[in-house]
Image (cartoon, rainbow, N blue to C red):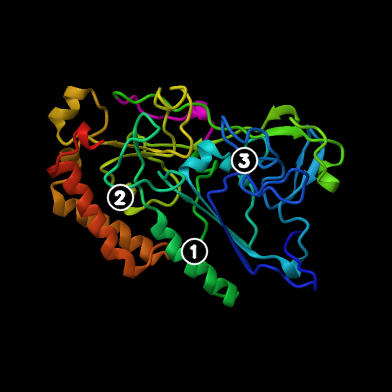
């Protein structure tokens, strides 16, 4: 079960698996390399994005395999687990598989010792602010969800020390809430100068040889590739911002569209393919006149907020609600609000022309 030491003790009391999506570490098999993770053009089909994906036992009728990630761990050695993912992992790391059925038709139950947190509108690692364009067609996503991780780290520490100190409830997009959908059902708006999302990264049923599952022996490489598992992605609202998951105050009270995907610039890769680990930052127009001139269906900043003070008031309300629910620390409110003020000044009162991008 990978959590029992040589003296039959629990090895890890708690585990925080961050931005792993539906993948796993590459351990205990022939040619294993722990840093492997799947991407469209590298590390392709190494045994990381493979069944099983959920902690609970599932049966895959196509391969007749039955397994769960935590199924082999004896109860006394079961760790407490946080799974945290950004939006990118749903597009680029098959994250939906960790909490859905294998056919993508329903949510699955989460074990009592597990929490799942999705950071809405985030990329694999938050980009810098002011945002810059890197390998993607759009500006890289600067949504800094690391403030959530500070609070969750302390929550895990308390939970490990005291079973009664339960951490905040799981928050992630669910099929039952229409927050997690097939890519063909995504309602992303038609924005000027912005392409529609490409197909997400897929995880496949693969055959690495007859002794891979029992002894870790990779005898077939490249593997025999069977069918893909259905991948679901977070649904969005009329602005293109996600409807589910944990939202940082600047995503809940937006000045832009924040996505977990970004298409390659032509100099970096095919322009219809997801840029690795990148999300998009697509700012709103400042005024109604600007957005009408651009043909942007999203309401402008001036249509949403009466000014800087009103915007910051709404951000403060959103931040306080997250503090009350245990997802942010009260001591972090000041820098979070300062960043929101800086964002307003940059977008509404400053120069954010292309020479800054």
Residue 166 in view of the camera: no
Label 2 environment density (alpha carbons within 10 Å; few <14, some 14–19, many ≥20): many
Q: Secondary structure at mark 2?
A: helix
Categorize mark 1 by other alpha carbons within 10 Å: few (<14), some (14-19), many (20+). Answer: some
Judged from this view, the residue extending furthest toward the bottom is: 162
Image marks 1 and 2: residues in contact by CB distance under 8 Å = no
Circle 2 or circle 3, nearest the eye? 2
- Of tags 3 and 1, the one toward the viewer is 1
**Residue at the image point whose x is 74% and y is 30% from the top:** 222
Q: Is residue 190 magenta?
A: yes
Magenta stretch bounds:
181-191
- SS for tag 3? loop
Magenta stretch holds residue 72: no
The tag on residue 106 is: 3
Q: Earlier in the sequence, mark 2 or mark 3?
A: 3
Whether residue 327 is situated above or below residue 347 in the rendered picture: below
**Residue at image mark 2:** 250
In this rendering, the answer to whether 161 lies above or below 171 is: below
Q: Main secondary structure of the magenta part?
A: loop
Q: Which residue is mark 1?
A: 168
Q: Is residue 142 left or right of residue 213?
A: left
The spot of residue 185 in percent (x, y) is: 49, 28
Give the x, y percent position of residue 96. 57, 41
The answer to whether 232 appears left or right of 66 in the picture is: left
* Quadrant (top left, top right, bottom left, bottom right) of the C terminus: top left
Q: CA distance from mark 2 to mark 3?
A: 30 Å
Check contact, mark 3 vs mark 1: CB within 8 A: no
């Amino acid at each position: 079960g990978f959590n029992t030491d040589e003296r039959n003790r629990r090895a890890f009391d708690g585990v925080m698996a961050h931005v792993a999506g539906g993948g796993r570490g590459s351990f205990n098999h022939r040619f294993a390399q722990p840093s492997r993770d799947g991407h469209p053009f590298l590390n392709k089909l190494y045994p990381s994005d493979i069944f099983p994906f959920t902690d609970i036992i599932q049966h895959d009728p196509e391969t007749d395999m039955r397994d769960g990630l935590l199924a082999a761990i004896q109860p006394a050695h079961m760790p407490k687990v946080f799974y945290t993912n950004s939006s990118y992992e749903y597009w680029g790391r098959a994250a939906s598989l960790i909490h859905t059925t294998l056919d993508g038709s329903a949510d699955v139950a989460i074990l009592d010792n597990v929490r799942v947190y999705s950071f809405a509108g985030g990329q694999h690692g938050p980009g810098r602010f002011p945002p810059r364009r890197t390998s993607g067609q759009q500006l890289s996503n600067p949504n800094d969800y690391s403030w959530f991780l500070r609070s969750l780290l302390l929550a895990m520490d308390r939970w490990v020390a005291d079973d009664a100190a339960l951490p905040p409830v799981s928050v992630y997009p669910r099929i039952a809430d229409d927050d997690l959908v097939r890519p063909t059902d995504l309602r992303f708006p038609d924005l000027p100068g912005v392409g529609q999302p490409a197909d997400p990264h897929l995880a496949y049923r693969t055959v690495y040889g007859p002794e891979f599952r029992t002894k870790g022996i990779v005898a077939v490489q490249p593997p025999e590739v069977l069918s893909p598992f259905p991948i679901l992605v977070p649904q969005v609202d009329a602005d293109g911002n996600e409807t589910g998951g944990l939202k940082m105050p600047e995503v809940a009270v937006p000045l832009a569209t924040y996505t977990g995907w970004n298409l390659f610039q032509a100099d970096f890769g095919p322009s219809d393919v997801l840029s690795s680990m990148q999300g998009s930052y697509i700012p709103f127009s400042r005024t109604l006149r600007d957005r009408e001139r651009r043909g942007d269906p999203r309401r402008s900043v001036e249509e949403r907020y009466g000014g800087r003070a009103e915007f910051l008031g709404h951000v403060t309300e959103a931040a306080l609600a997250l503090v009350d629910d245990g997802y942010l620390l009260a001591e972090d409110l000041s820098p979070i609000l300062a960043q929101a003020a800086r964002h307003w000044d940059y977008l509404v009162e400053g120069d954010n022309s292309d020479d800054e991008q």
